[in-house]
Amino acid sequence: MTKYFTSKSDVPILVLSIFALLAAGVLSMVTMANKPEKVSADLAGNPYMAADMAAKDGIEAARWHIICHSRTEAGGLGTKYDINGATYKVEWGDLNTADSTVNVKSTGESRLPTNESYSLTMESKIKINNLPSHKSDIMTSYYDRNGVRQIVSR
C-alpha cells in the first residue's frame, strides 16, 4: 500500500478528506430534504401565500436580470414557475439614471387542484447598484420577445 503514497502524511490526509466529503454530502442531503417539506407544508392550504411568494420572487428575478445583463431599458420575463409551485410574470421599466431605480411589476399566481386560481400583483421601485459595463444585444432581443415591454414608468 505504501508504494502508492509519497509520504506517511498522505494516508491521514486522505482519510480526513474522505470524511469531510461524506460529512458535506450528508449535510447537503439533510438540508435539501428538510426545506421543501417546510415550504410545501406552509403553503399546502394557503394559495395566497404561494402567490405572494411567487410575486416577491419575480421582483428578485427582475433585479438579478437587470444587474446581470446590464439592462437599462424596459423588459420583462414571461411566465416562470416558482419553487413553491406557483408562477410569476415580471416586467420592468427603463432605468432611471438619476437615482438608479427601476419600477418593477410582478404578478404571482397560484392554482388549486379545484382549478381556482389566486393572483397577486406587486409593484415596487428597486435600487440597482453596480451595473456591469458590458452590454449584450442578444439579451435585448430575448427580453423584447417576451412581449412585456409595455410597463408604464412612474
Image (cartoon, rainbow, N blue to C red):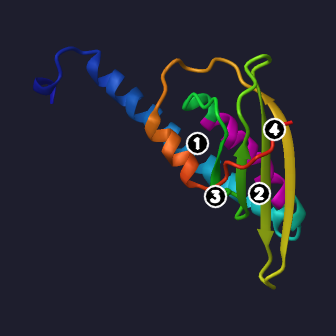
Magenta stretch in the rendered image: 51-65
Which tag, 2 or 1, sits closer to the chain's start? 1
Residue placed most toward the observer, 120 or 98: 98
Residue type highlighted by circle 4: Ser
Residue type highlighted by circle 1: Leu
> Please, what is the dominant secondary structure of the magenta stretch?
helix
Q: Which one is closest to the eye, mark 2 or mark 1? A: 2
Residue placed most toward the observer, 49 or 58: 58
Q: Which part of the image, by quadrant, shows the C terminus? A: top right
The residue that disc 1 covers is: 27
Q: Position of residue 106 (x, y in %)?
A: 78, 50
Which tag, 4 or 2, sits closer to the chain's start? 2
The residue that disc 2 covers is: 39
Residue type highlighted by circle 2: Val
The residue that disc 4 covers is: 153
Question: How many residues crowd around disc 4 within 10 Å: few (fewer than 14), some, or many (20 or more)?
Answer: few
The mark found on residue 80 in the picture is 3
